[in-house]
Image (cartoon, rainbow, N blue to C red):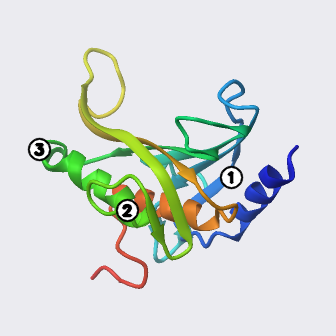
Amino acid sequence: MPEDFRLAVDSLAGAHIRPEIEVGPIRPPQRLAPFSHALGAEVQQIDDSEGLHEDDQGSTFGRLILLHDPAGHEAWNGTMRLVAYVQAEVEAALAMDPLLPEVAWSWLADALGVAEGDTASSFGEVEVTALGGTVTSTTSVRYGDMAGQPRTHQLELRASWTATDLGLGRHLEAFCEVLSAAAGLPPVGVTEL
């Protein structure tokens, strides 16, 4: 394992994650790059009186995958690529809002410090290039004996960017900021009344 990759993976442990978000290693994809590491994240609902419930199923989850190619990759413009996937259940009114894709993309751009229309940033501890991705809003309707709500709405954000430094803790924090926004959590330090 290359030293750069090991240092990048180790740096993820330094991220400050909200208590509502559970993060842990998952199996990474095997064929996208010579070296890869993946984390799964899920927003758990917290009941103030009882704390986090381990058996609760979060409706917002995601994956952050670190890909490393020591030889570099022309499309990446570097050797370390982060790939993010976020899925969240959303309310019908939000799912029907024509601005939802722009708003969801702004969550990521703001968290990474990328100005509108740019694909690169140098924001505090985060430096990225070659940012790109998609936002999809879907509605699923169940029929017949299918269990669950008859109509559900999902938001999916898929993005990737190249990290220009080995300190990736802030990248994981930015990813978790997107999860928080997608789940509708209040900003850190703000209490809902």
Q: Which mark is residue 98?
A: 3
The residue carrying mark 1 is 24
Q: Give the SS element for disc 2.
A: loop
Q: Amino acid at mark 2?
A: Val
Quadrant the N terminus occupies: top right
> Which of the two discs, 3 and 1, sits closer to the camera?
3
Is residue 188 positioned above or below 168 on the image?
A: below
Label ID, residue 114: 2
The amino acid type found where label 3 is placed reads Pro
Nearest to viewer (mark 3 / mark 2)? 2
Cα distance, mark 3 to mark 2? 22 Å
Quadrant where the C terminus lies?
bottom left
Residue under the point 34% across and 20% down? 146
Res. 93 mark: none
Callout 2: 10 Å neighbours few (<14), some, many (20+)?
Answer: many
Q: Position of residue 74 (x, y in %)?
A: 57, 35
Using the rendered image of the protein, determine whether residue 95 is visible from the camera's viewpoint. Answer: yes
For numbered disc 3, what is the local secondary structure? loop
Q: Nearer the viewer, residue 172 or 181?
A: 172
**1 or 2: tag closer to the N-terminus:** 1
Q: Residue at x 53, y 64 (%)?
A: 127
